[in-house]
Amino acid sequence: MALTKHLKRPTLECLEARWVPATIRLIGGNLFISNPGPTTLANPLKITLTANNTFTVQDGTSPAVTGLKAGSGLFITGSNKADFITLNLADKTFGGNVFINSGNGDDTITLTAAATGGKIGGNLTVLMGNGADTLNVPSGTGVQVGGNTVVTGGLGNDTFVFGDPPFTKFGGNLTIHNVNTVGANLPATIGGNLTITSTEALVNNWKLAVTVGGNATLVSGNGDDEIFFSGSGFPPQAGSVAGNVVVNLGGGNNKFGVAPGFGPAGNFTIGGSLSVFAGTGDDEIRIADLGDSVTVGGNTVIDGGGGDNQYRLGATWSAFGNVLIQGGNGVNDLSGATNSFLATVAGNLSFYFGNGDNLITLGAVSSIGGALNVYTGNGNNTLTLEGAQTYLANMLFGNGDDTLVLNNAALVLTGYVNGGGGTNTLTQTAGTLAPTLILLNF
């Protein structure tokens, strides 16, 4: 009798699921870390300096890898999922460059150190891919970067917060691109230039309580942006830019300020010039508003662009060069209790406005060391002078119905004033017209 042979059909047996830890490679003094497993805020991919140029790496809850020595470069590459990456400098120094590429996904990168300070000797480069990403330097962290720092965001709303006490120090230039929320509290210091740019049409919110050793350049996109330089803290502390400040607000309805008075803020000093350029939106520009103090060592140019603009230029603003304020064909408002021009100007003060109905009040505490130049278009303009000083005027109004008001007993008006076309009015509540004044078309 023949035996029947029973054959078993081949099958695949399930293996136990395993978490594959990140790939770690040491090549010629460089440490490469990539392909992290699933990470969380509580269990991130954590790279810790345990001694100078010596690292421990732990990927989530996987076993830590210790004693990794590298002196040239640290390269950290995330995945395209939501990664949590922490670089802890502790109180040690890494002498090389650090490069972090978090990949796509909503990533959180934390750069921390002991309160006494931990240092990256070279450059720091952070690339945040597409997604809502965050780069955070926590409160109480003494992070120091010896070289240049570059932080680049991708598509999505990105955040970079740094600089709580005791110290965050960027020894070289700090360059930030396409990061929508930037928050810096004193005493964060930048040894070189500060450059922040955005090409996205998203809302940018940049609050910069910083001390900058070089120049500061801020260029925003076409969203409704809020951008402020300020001192900070309790009690208020001082901030500064040693060189020039250039701000281009782009389109949108924007707010820009230097010590703008929105919260606890201190004195802010600009050693060079201040230049602010707005687009076609309705913009609000504040300098030394609500009691904060601002000093500009060079010339100041404020261009409100073509929208309806408000200028809140406070009494504690000292401008040691010339000041030019200009706007397009919208309504440019420097009047009333909140918007009057109240600064001290060592040089000339000039207003160049288009065809809107513009309102200008030079308040009683304002002071002009040079000439007062006013050129307007064909709107109905009102200029009110309230300072206790001699105004050396060079004024030419357009074809609208313009009004000139003198409102201080110690005021003297001299120079040249031409009302242009239209029905123009001189209201002399108080003050004196100098015998040398040339007054036309009033």
Image (tube, rainbow, N blue to C red):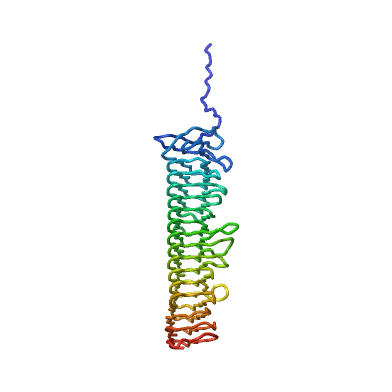
Pick the front one: 189 or 384: 189
**Which residue reaches farthest right?**
234
Give the farthest residue toward the top: 1
Query: Residue 127: x and y, percent?
Result: 45, 48
In this rendering, the count of numbered labels is 0
Q: Position of residue 227 (x, y in %)?
A: 51, 61
Q: Is residue 240 above or below residue 286?
A: above
Which is nearer the eye, 345 or 232?
345
Residue plotted at (44% across, 38% down): 32
Along the viewing direction, whichever of 174 and 377 lies nearer the viewer: 174
Q: Visible in this render: residue 131?
A: yes
Q: Is residue 284 visible in the rendered structure shown here? A: no
Q: Nearer the viewer, residue 24 or 140?
A: 140
Q: Position of residue 440 (x, y in %)?
A: 43, 88
View extreme (left): residue:
28
Residue 44 point in image, percent of width and height: 55, 41
